[in-house]
Image: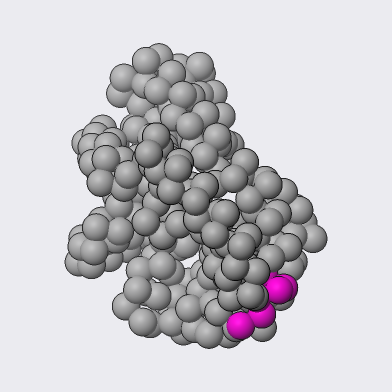
């Protein structure tokens, strides 16, 4: 229902875009944008393609992916999500993408309104539950955030992304052992899922397990081709573990790269 049934090429483009979005990586988001843009060219009234574009732009602005400055891509995300809603006011994906953007713009009322509307329109759309969980965590409503993340995982039990969101909500609630179990389960399912390695490193750092944080963070660095966020956290692990020289070399690398590319402040 989200795509024009009379344009199979546009529909296929949207499906491919969604496939690459689920990788939650820089290359995945950039490839997804190419497919969504191709779908829009095939069918300029394709609301699902615009909603996908909004979500892809949102990914590019995250600290973990960090390809573009958030202030740049969030404007593009809002425009794409708004266009999707104009074309199809009943498209849950569009409201979920808009909710993500407004959440990270700290527009609490706008975020809650958009995300609750997305869930109302399609209770089985997992990303809406995931982003709503993040909203609840930002409001320090951690028990509700965990419940919402579990709803998303119940909808897609095999989704590493859904399980990662649950682990992240557990982390916010300081349930570090439970978060670690979920992240290790993800890595049993897919050793190449960089965000799980990254989150595991975060858990180990916040609990003072500096040496244990190094292997998963190094894996995140390798898988993402030295993403700044992964490098920054690895430097922190090295520094906390007393390996100051290694930490300093990473800091110098990030400083050099910041002269020619975007390096997220969180890195």
User: 90 or 140: which is nearer to us?
Assistant: 140
Question: Measuring 41% from the left and 67% from the top, which residue is drawn there?
Answer: 134
User: 204 or 234: which is nearer to us?
Assistant: 234
- Residue 42 x/y as whole percent: 40, 14
Q: Based on the displayed image, in which of its 4 quarters is residue 206 positioned?
A: bottom right
- Residue 157 x/y as whole percent: 67, 61
Question: Measuring 32% from the left and 44% from the top, which residue is drawn there?
Answer: 69
Question: Measuring 30% from the left and 52% from the top, which residue is drawn there?
Answer: 101
Image: magenta residue range: 208-213
Q: Is the magenta stretch mostly helix, strand or loop?
A: helix
**Is residue 251 shown above or below 168?**
above
- Residue 152 x/y as whole percent: 54, 63
Judge whether residue 210 is colored magenta.
yes
Q: Based on the displayed image, in which of its 4 quarters is residue 184 positioned?
A: bottom right
**Is residue 173 shown above or below 183?**
below
- Whether residue 81 appears in this view of the structure is no
**Is residue 252 shown above or below 183?**
above
Colour scheme employed for the rendering of this structure: one colour
The single residue placed furthest to the right in the displayed view is 188
Q: In this view, does 168 lie to the left or right of 113?
A: right
The single residue placed furthest to the front in the displayed view is 245
Question: Measuring 55% from the left and 36% from the top, which residue is drawn there?
Answer: 28
User: 203 or 99: which is nearer to us?
Assistant: 203
Q: Based on the displayed image, in which of its 4 quarters is residue 43 positioned?
A: top left
- Whether residue 2 appears in this view of the structure is yes
| On-image quarter of the C terminus | bottom left
| On-image quarter of the N terminus | top left
- Residue 243 x/y as whole percent: 65, 69
């Amino acid at each position: 229902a989200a795509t024009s049934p009379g344009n199979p090429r546009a529909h296929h483009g949207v499906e491919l875009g969604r496939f690459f979005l689920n990788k939650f990586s820089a290359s995945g988001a950039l490839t997804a944008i190419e497919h969504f843009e191709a779908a829009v060219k095939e069918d300029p009234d394709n609301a699902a393609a615009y909603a996908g574009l909004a979500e892809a732009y949102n990914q590019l602005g995250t600290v973990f992916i960090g390809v573009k400055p958030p202030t740049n891509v969030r404007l593009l995300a809002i425009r794409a999500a708004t266009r999707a809603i104009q074309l199809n006011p009943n498209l849950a994906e569009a409201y979920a993408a808009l909710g993500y953007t407004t959440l990270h713009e700290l527009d609490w009322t706008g975020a809650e309104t958009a995300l609750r509307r997305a869930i109302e329109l399609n209770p089985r759309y997992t990303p809406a539950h995931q982003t709503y969980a993040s909203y609840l965590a930002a409001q320090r409503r951690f028990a509700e955030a965990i419940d919402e993340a579990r709803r998303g995982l119940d909808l897609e039990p095999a989704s590493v992304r859904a399980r990662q969101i649950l682990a992240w909500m557990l982390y916010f609630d300081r349930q570090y052992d439970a978060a670690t179990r979920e992240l290790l389960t993800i890595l049993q399912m897919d050793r190449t899922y960089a965000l799980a390695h990254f989150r595991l490193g975060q858990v180990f750092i916040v609990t003072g397990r500096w040496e244990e944080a190094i292997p998963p963070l190094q894996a995140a660095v390798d898988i993402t081709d030295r993403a700044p966020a992964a490098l920054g956290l690895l430097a922190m692990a090295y520094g906390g573990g007393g390996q100051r020289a290694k930490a300093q070399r990473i800091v110098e690398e990030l400083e050099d790269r910041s002269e020619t590319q975007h390096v997220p402040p969180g890195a």
